[in-house]
Amino acid sequence: MQPSNLPTIFSITESELDLNDLLAQVTLTSTGAAAIFAGMVRGETKRGDAHQTEYLEYESYVPMAESKMKQVADEIRERWPVVEGIAIVQRIGRLYPKTPTVLIICTAAHRDTGVFDAARYGIDRLKEIVPVWKKEVGPDGEEWVEGDYIPKPGE
C-alpha cells in the first residue's frame, strides 16, 4: 500500500480521547502490532520541584498544530516505512489528573519492525514542534509550562 492510502489521523480536540476508536481507525487486516503512547495529567509531580496539580489547561493554535502533526506523521512514514497506521491526537481544554491528554498510535504487521520506536519518535516530535501550550494550576497558583522548542525561520 502507498503511504497516501494508509490510515493517518492527526487532530486537536476538546473531546474525550477514545483509545478503542482510534486504534480501530488505524488498524488494517494486515496489522499484528500496535504501539500506543498515552500522556496523562499528573496530580502529583515528584521530579524537579515536587508539587501538586489541580488541573491543566491546554491551548493550541489548531491549524498550525494539525499541520505540524501531519509533518510528524510524514516523518514517521519516512523513517519507518513499515508503519501502517498512525494516530496523533492532542486534547485541549481543562483536564484533571488521570485524564489522557495525548495519544500516539503506530501500527504495523509485526512488533519487531520499529513500531515502538516510531511511537516514541511521535510523542518526542509532538512535544518538540507542535504548538500546544499548557498552564498548570495547583494550590500554590498557576504557571505556564514552557517547552524547549524555539521555532527556526520557516517552521
Image (cartoon, grey):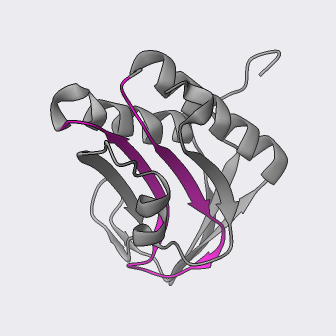
Residue 40: name its quadrant. Answer: bottom left
Which secondary structure type mostly characterizes the magenta part of the structure? strand
User: In this rendering, is residue 35 above or below 50?
Assistant: above
The answer to whether residue 106 is seen in the rendering is yes
- Residue 85: percent from left, percent from top: 45, 42
Instruction: Count all numbered tags in the image, as a single digit.
Output: 0
Q: Give the residue furthest to the left.
A: 112
The spot of residue 137 in percent (x, y) is 57, 76
Q: Quadrant where the C terminus lies?
A: top right
Q: Which of 21 and 90 lies nearest the eye of the viewer? A: 21
Asked if the stretch drawn in magenta spans residue 63, the answer is no
Q: Residue at x 80, y 41 (%)?
A: 64
Q: Nearer the viewer, residue 98 or 14?
A: 14
Residue 40 against residue 65 in the figure, above or below: below
Which is more toward the observer, 2 or 68?
Answer: 2
Q: Residue at x 52, y 72 (%)?
A: 17
In the rendering, at what x and y percent does residue 38 appear?
38, 59
Near-viewer residue (2 or 91): 2
On the image, the x and y values in percent for residue 144 come to: 65, 59
Write down the region rendered in magenta. Answer: 82-110
- In this rendering, the answer to whether 49 lies above or below 124 is below
Q: Is residue 41 visible?
A: no
In the depicted structure, whether residue 63 falls above or below residue 137:
above
Q: Residue at x 75, y 38 (%)?
A: 67
Q: Residue at x 50, y 17 (%)?
A: 78
